Amino acid sequence: MPENTAVAGVVVRAIQPDDFDQWLSLWDGYNAFYGRAGATALPQEITQTTWERFFNPVEPVFAVVAEHDGEVVGLAHYLFHRSTTRLGPVCYLQDLFTAPTRRKLGIGKALIHKVYEQATLAGASRVYWQTQSTNEAGRALYDKLARHSGFIVYSHEL
């Protein structure tokens, strides 16, 4: 990974194994934001497997964290995959979260820009993500950094 990215006192870097406790706190906050807490929380096995994938060189799943004042205060998880409409890979920004007490400091923007940087280095020609239509704060940021293509996401659990 290239040099760390710094924006307004925020340093974005590759996740490290000793970030686990701080990452877990953010991961739990992210999941709670999307209704995955308490009785609907992700199984521990998913959390542990997700963490392990970041450090497995054969996995296409990556993570960066944002630090502010020496504390991990944001995370971004992304992955690369093939596309039927492009020759090279595309990058899916799957998870993005900033500690609620550190919002409005440019952390989300710095995390997204780091993913853009990593995607460019990997030869990807596009980064995309999704969010809930009710995520007004997130969408206000996303509208400044990307184009909403108008697609509606459908899913079916198996």
Image: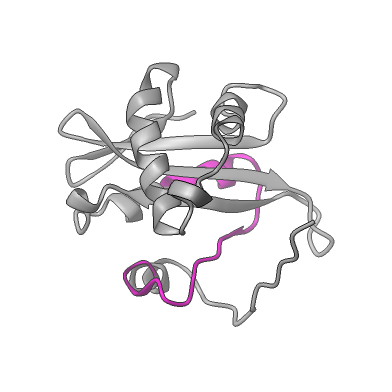
Question: Farthest bottom residue?
Answer: 150
**Figure quadrant of residue 87:** bottom right
**Figure quadrant of residue 5:** top left
Please name the residue shown 68% across and 35% down the image.
Answer: 60
Please name the residue shown 84% across and 61% down the image.
Answer: 84
Q: Is residue 6 left or right of residue 139?
A: left
Residue 8 position in % (x across, y down)? 18, 47
Residue 44 position in % (x across, y down)? 55, 32
Please name the residue shown 66% across and 22% down the image.
Answer: 57
How has the structure been colored for display?
one colour
Q: Between 145 and 69, which is closer to the camera in this rendering?
A: 69
Question: Farthest top residue?
Answer: 18
Position above or below: 74 against 132: above
Position above or below: 72 against 100: above
Q: Between 152 and 141, which is closer to the camera in this rendering?
A: 152
Whether residue 8 is visible to the viewer of this picture, yes or no, is: yes
Q: Is residue 104 left or right of residue 27?
A: left
Quadrant (top left, top right, bottom left, bottom right) of the C terminus? bottom right
Please name the residue shown 55% across and 43% down the image.
Answer: 42
Residue 34 position in % (x across, y down)? 46, 59
**Is 123 part of what is drawn in magenta?**
yes
Position above or below: 28 against 88: above
**Is 31 part of what is drawn in magenta?**
no
Q: Between 36 and 69, which is closer to the camera in this rendering?
A: 36
The residue segment tinted magenta is 114-138
